[in-house]
Image: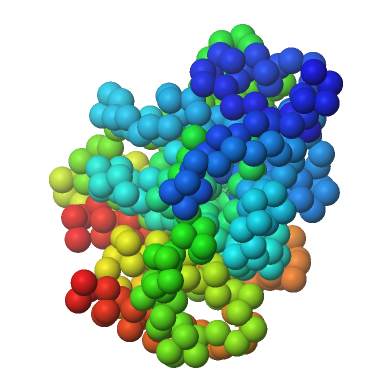
């Protein structure tokens, strides 16, 4: 195995695109190094992106945020403006692992590891985030929900790297939230995760919403029917019940030691409803 | 080159001292500390980020050294449990861990000390809940955690007195 720590995105792409056999990006390493140490993968080349200045920072961009792919969960949590605009995204990223893991783990790594249970991903999908991808043929943007295609598999092509995650400008009276169910209060993998983002008009009527679920399908899913249940309502009890039903209906989970299909389907509805309530309170400035 | 290609040359700072080493690309910082540098305070409990026995501080943030490559330490500042005491004087956390019997087998202790110091550096007056969350990445099979929490509270109180 060879280790490289380039200082520019261009050099990182050149290394990743070279014919080195299996090449892997190293962000925080909290998935990658576990996979290497447990002999699940044996890359020939590791490209550490943490020395690339443009991937280390959080910048405001046309009213939104551009979060470099090497920014850690701890750094996200310390960024006040980001926390104020997108509390759901930050709380989701901050759920990942312990303080030690937070010092290292990135949202780009969470996304590219392509686990259906990745905690930050439903919140990013609900937020309408896009991934900026740099590769041998230049840059492109992709909605975050189109990055993972199956457990452990992404739509990135050889040589491509997620350079940043972009969160759009926040409309007034908007709020987001993420909730997960785990059997203990820290350090576990989501049995179900739910992210909701919504916007209200001056009269408190919901004008836009996005709902995403984790750990209930082969990848994180956007649930347009659940969002439709909110749009046009004041996010009252009836709308929340319709949202929960739509969320449950969208699940196609597996049975495993963490939870049965039936349990996951039920909990997805409950969590989506509770996350929507929190997002609503945040949109109302409560 | 051949031979040299696979080895990475690293210059870093460990517990305030400049250190240079050669390591394999796949070696972790924990391997380097223990096997190359004789700093055996950090322990390997799991090797997969779950137990925190390998905790060290890199550039002001506590990490699992089993999930950091030795090569990544280039130009960084690393603090291990060996850097806590000043000469013969134990750090207040070390002193309180002794006084409160916050260890039995001791395998988890270096990791708890490093993580607790990192916690108190950021938050000198944590609540019990904050201490328990702050140390959730450190596992102990012996003590039941209560004595560890009391020791951290006592050390925090002493450190606030200055
Ligand atoms: C103890 C422990 C607890 C954990 N708890 C949680 C949890 O609660 N919730 C959760 O969701 N996850 C959890 N994880 C998993 C992991 O910490 C997260 O998925 C984390 O966000 C991964 O980020 P990273 O920067 O460490 O990724 P890395 O390990 O560096 O990378 C992960 C994968 O993505 C690829 N990659 C990384 N960055 C890029 C990029 N910019 N472009 C292209 N490919 C890239 C890598 O090549 C690798 O295949 C836990 C892990 C551990 C060890
Ligand atoms: S040995 Fe590193 S976390 Fe257990
Ligand atoms: S004292 Fe034995 S593991 Fe903590």
Taking the spot 43% from the left edge, 48% from the top edge, the residue there is B16
Taking the spot 39% from the left edge, 72% from the top edge, the residue there is B89
Q: Nearer the viewer, residue A175 or A53?
A: A53
**Left or right of residue B73: residue A242:** left
Name the quadrant containing residue B25.
Answer: top right
Q: How many numbered marks does the figure carry?
A: 0
| Quarter occupied by the C terminus of chain A | bottom left
Q: Nearer the viewer, residue A246 or B157?
A: B157
- Judged from this view, the residue extending furthest toward the left is A202
Query: Where is A157 relative to A181, above or below?
Result: above
Residue A13 picture location, percent across and down: 62, 17
Residue A164 picture location, percent across and down: 47, 29
Residue B103 picture location, percent across and down: 55, 85
Query: Where is A57 relative to B114, above or below?
Result: above
Query: Where is B159 relative to B15, above or below?
Result: below
Q: Is residue B17 visible?
A: yes
Q: Nearer the viewer, residue A193 or B79?
A: B79
Q: Is residue B50 visible?
A: no
**Left or right of residue B50: residue B110:** left
Residue A47 picture location, percent across and down: 64, 28
Query: Where is A91 relative to B141, above or below?
Result: above
- Judged from this view, the residue extending furthest toward the front is B88
Taking the spot 26% from the left edge, 60% from the top edge, the residue there is A281
Name the quadrant containing residue B73.
Answer: top right
Taking the spot 43% from the left edge, 71% from the top edge, the residue there is B88
**Left or right of residue B46: residue B97:** left
């Amino acid at each position: 195995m060879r280790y490289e720590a380039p200082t520019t995105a261009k050099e990182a792409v050149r290394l990743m695109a070279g014919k080195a056999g299996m090449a892997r990006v190293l962000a925080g390493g909290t998935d990658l190094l576990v996979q290497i140490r447990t002999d699940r993968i044996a890359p020939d080349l590791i490209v550490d992106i943490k020395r690339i200045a443009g991937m280390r920072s959080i910048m405001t961009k046309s009213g939104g945020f551009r979060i470099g792919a090497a920014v850690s969960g701890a750094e996200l949590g310390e960024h006040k403006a980001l926390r104020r605009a997108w509390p759901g995204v930050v709380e989701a990223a901050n759920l990942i692992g312990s303080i030690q893991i937070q010092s290292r783990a990135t949202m780009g790594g969470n996304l590219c590891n392509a686990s259906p249970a990745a905690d930050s991903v439903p919140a990013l999908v609900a937020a309408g985030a896009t991934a900026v991808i740099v590769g041998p043929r230049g840059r492109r943007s992709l909605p975050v929900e189109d990055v993972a295609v199956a457990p452990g598999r992404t739509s990135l092509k050889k040589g491509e790297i997620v350079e940043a995650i972009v969160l759009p400008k926040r409309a007034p009276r908007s709020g987001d939230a993420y909730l997960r169910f785990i059997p203990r209060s820290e350090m576990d993998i989501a049995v179900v995760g739910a992210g909701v983002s919504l916007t209200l008009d001056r009269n408190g009527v919901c004008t836009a919403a996005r709902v995403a679920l984790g750990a209930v399908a082969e990848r994180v899913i956007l649930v347009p029917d659940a969002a439709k249940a909110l749009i046009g309502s004041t996010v009252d009890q009836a709308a929340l019940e319709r949202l929960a039903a739509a969320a449950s209906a969208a699940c196609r989970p597996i049975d495993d030691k963490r939870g049965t299909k039936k349990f996951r389907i039920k909990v997805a509805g409950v969590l989506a409803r509770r996350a929507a309530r929190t997002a609503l309170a945040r949109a109302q400035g409560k | 080159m051949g031979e040299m290609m696979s080895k990475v040359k690293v210059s870093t700072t460990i517990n305030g001292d400049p250190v240079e080493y050669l390591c394999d690309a796949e070696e972790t910082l924990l391997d380097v500390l223990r096997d190359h540098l004789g700093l055996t305070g950090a322990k390997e409990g799991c090797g997969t980020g779950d137990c925190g026995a390998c905790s060290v501080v890199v550039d002001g943030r506590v990490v699992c050294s089993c999930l950091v490559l030795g090569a990544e330490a280039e130009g960084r500042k690393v603090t291990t449990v060996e850097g806590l005491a000043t000469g013969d004087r134990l750090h207040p956390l070390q002193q309180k861990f002794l006084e409160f019997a916050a260890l039995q087998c001791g395998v988890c202790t270096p990791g708890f000390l490093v993580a607790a110091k990192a916690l108190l550096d950021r938050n000198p007056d944590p609540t019990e809940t904050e201490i328990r969350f702050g140390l959730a990445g450190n596992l102990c099979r012996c003590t039941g955690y209560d004595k560890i929490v009391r020791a951290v509270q006592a050390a925090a109180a002493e450190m606030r007195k200055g």
